[in-house]
Each structure stands twice: as C-alpha cells, then as structure tokens.
Image (cartoon, rainbow, N blue to C red):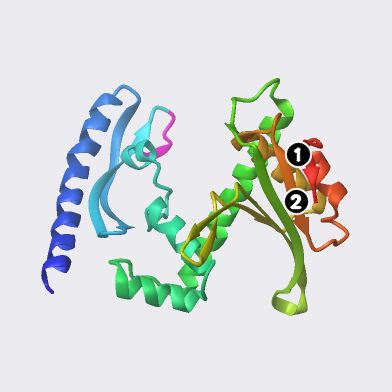
Amino acid sequence: MRFLPFSCSLLTQLKGKFIEPASLCIFSCNSLHFLLAKNRDSKTIQFTFGAVNFQHTLLGDREGHPHYVFDEWIGFRKYQRFSPLVEVKVAELASECTYRETARVLQEWTAVHISHQTVGSIVRRVGKAQAQADKEMVEELEEAASLSKGKEVDILFAEADGVFVHGTEKKSMEVHHAIVYEGWDMNGKRVSIRQPKVIMTTVSSDAFWKEVQAFAAHHYSLEKAQIVTNSDGGKDTQQRSFKKPFHNHGILS
C-alpha cells in the first residue's frame, strides 16, 4: 500500500531535478537576450502524480523587464499552481458534482490536494479559456474562405435546449445547451450515444447558435449529411433555429 505514494514522491523529485538543468539550458540558448540574473527561487506545480518543486531563475532582458525563462518557455503562468491537465480534469469533475465533492474525490483518489474554493477558481479560469477558444473558433469561421475537410457522416443528430438557473444575489441566467452526436450504440440492454459533443454557454442566443455553427463546421463535412434535430420547442430552440448552423442540410425534426 505504501508503494504508490513512494513511487509518486520519487517521480516528483526526479521531475524537479530534471527541470533545473533544462532551465539552465534554455537560459544558455537565450543568453544574448537576457543579461542579468536577478533572483533564484523555487516554484511548485501540482501534477496528477504529485507536486513538483523546482528552482528557476529570474532574469532581466535588455530593457530591464523580468522574466522566468523556463516558465515562459513551457507555458506556466506567473502564479500557476496546477498543471493544465489537472485544471481541465478538475473542471470536468466539477461539472458532475459539487466543488466540495470534487475536492474530496481528488484527495482520495489522486495525489492532488485542493480546497473547494480553489476548485471554483479553476472552474472559472477554465471556463474563460474555453469561452475564448469558442470565440476564436467563431471568428475563424467568419473570416475563413474555406475550412479543412471534416468528418463525413450520413446522419448527424443535434439537440438543443435552454434553461434558467438561479445564481447568487437572487440573479438568474439562461444556459444554452446543445449536443451533437452520430447515433446510438447498443451494449446489451444499455444504449449509449455515439461520439457526443456538447456546447454549453451563457452567451446570447445568437452567439450560441454561431458557436454551434462553428463547432459543426470544424468537426464535420455536412454537404451530404441529413440532420435530425430535437428540442423542447422554446423560443430560441425551434426548428428554424437549427437552419443557420446546419445550412438547411436535410434537416428533420
């Protein structure tokens, strides 16, 4: 029972020892751009296998601006404490249970020790990053003369819904939700949808459908596909709402 914690501890130590010479190597490669070593201190990043502590050097460039060269090279933010994979997995788990339950599950089943408040902070940060990625995907679709060829399917299923949820300070917001999938698979008596892809956002209805359109265009080639749609018939999810993102490609409701 002690083998796994010992292995994780050994791995984190080895990772930390590897990072230090890597940082020096990057410094040597960039020595023409950085003139002065201002400070040397430690940083700890929590990975799925444990916390890695390493030494890094604060350098000054020719204009006097400070840089942690290794951190910038690998993509660590200034006050980042968790690896990108940990942050994504925390956000995914938090979408299925409470923040407190997320923190408890992580502590019991992984080497990640985290408070429920930090879970909330990570969820908000990942959400902002995803929102920015969605925005860029929409802008790319609007500006592109053509897109790379996506997956060809005979039938694509799309469902959409909207629901109002209560937030803090007696405020409520509408959450737009869509799911796109390629059909069903049977496993005995169990049914599972095939290749589900989900879009969920609190932006306006028009922006939501633009995201659905960009998402479908990036993943599929729908010229010969038949689109089967379903919704609750609400104002923003009626049959005509599906026509723009799917360009009337044989839409059935």
Label 2: element kind: strand
For residue 246, the mark is 1
As drawn, 149 above or below 56: above
- Is the C-beta separation of discs 1 and 2 under 8 Å? yes
Pick the residue in front: 13 or 227.
227
Range shown magenta: 63-67
Most common secondary structure along the magenta stretch: loop
**Mark 2 surroundings: few (<14), some (14-19) or many (≥20) residues within 10 A:** some
Instruction: Report the residue at 73% width, 78% height from top.
Output: 169
Label 1: element kind: helix
Residue 206 image offset from top left, x and y in percent: 82, 48
Q: Tell me the residue that label 2 is attached to.
A: 229
Asked if residue 237 is among those painted magenta in the image, a careful observer would answer no
Residue 179 image offset from top left, x and y in percent: 65, 54
Pick the residue in front: 117 or 151.
151
Residue 193 lies left or right of residue 160; in this view the side is left
Q: Residue type at mark 2: give it.
A: Thr
Q: Residue type at mark 1: give it.
A: Phe
Kindly report which numbered mark, 1 or 2, lies closer to the viewer in this rendering.
2
